[in-house]
Image (cartoon, rainbow, N blue to C red):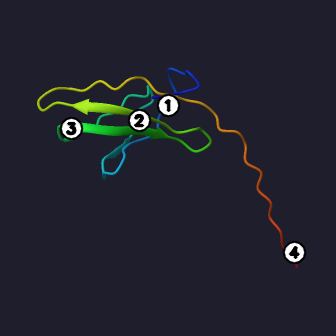
Amino acid sequence: VTREGLLAGNAGILVYVAGTAFQTLTGDDGTFRLPDLPEGTFRLGAQLDGYGPQQQTVETTAGEVTQARSMDLQPSPARKVVVDGVLE
């Protein structure tokens, strides 16, 4: 998983399996491992504050390493936040 195509500086991107408790963070190079994921078909997602999330379907097979397709996160459009109040 990368941010804006960068090959380094990708540590801390959350990678998760939708609908399960499986999740992990990427290393600096964007790689990750989800050990003990059972056999089946899952929705794999990646997200990082300030970037649009991505998801893909992955199929795992018992006793094999599954290689997910690359996901490249792109910046989200800035959201305008309005704070209203009285300062005393």
Q: Is residue 63 left or right of residue 68?
A: left
Q: Is residue 60 left or right of residue 22?
A: left
Kindly report the distance in space between the C-alpha atoms of the residues bearing marks 2 and 3. 22 Å
- The disc label shown at residue 2, or none: none
Kindly report the distance in space between the C-alpha atoms of the residues bearing marks 3 and 4. 55 Å
Kindly report the distance in space between the C-alpha atoms of the residues bearing marks 2 and 4. 42 Å
**Along the line of sight, which residue is nearer the eye, 36 or 9?**
36
In this rendering, is residue 58 above or below 12? above
- The disc label shown at residue 10, or none: 1
- The disc label shown at residue 40, or none: 3
- The residue that mark 4 highlights is 87
Type of the residue with mark 1: Asn
Q: Secondary structure at mark 2?
A: loop
Image spot of residue 71 (x, y percent): 46, 27
Type of the residue with mark 2: Thr
Near mark 2 (Cα within 10 A), the count class, few <14, some 14-19 or many ≥20, is: some
Instruction: Tell me what residue is drawn at x 80 percent, y 60 percent.
Output: 82
- The disc label shown at residue 26, or none: 2
Type of the residue with mark 3: Gly
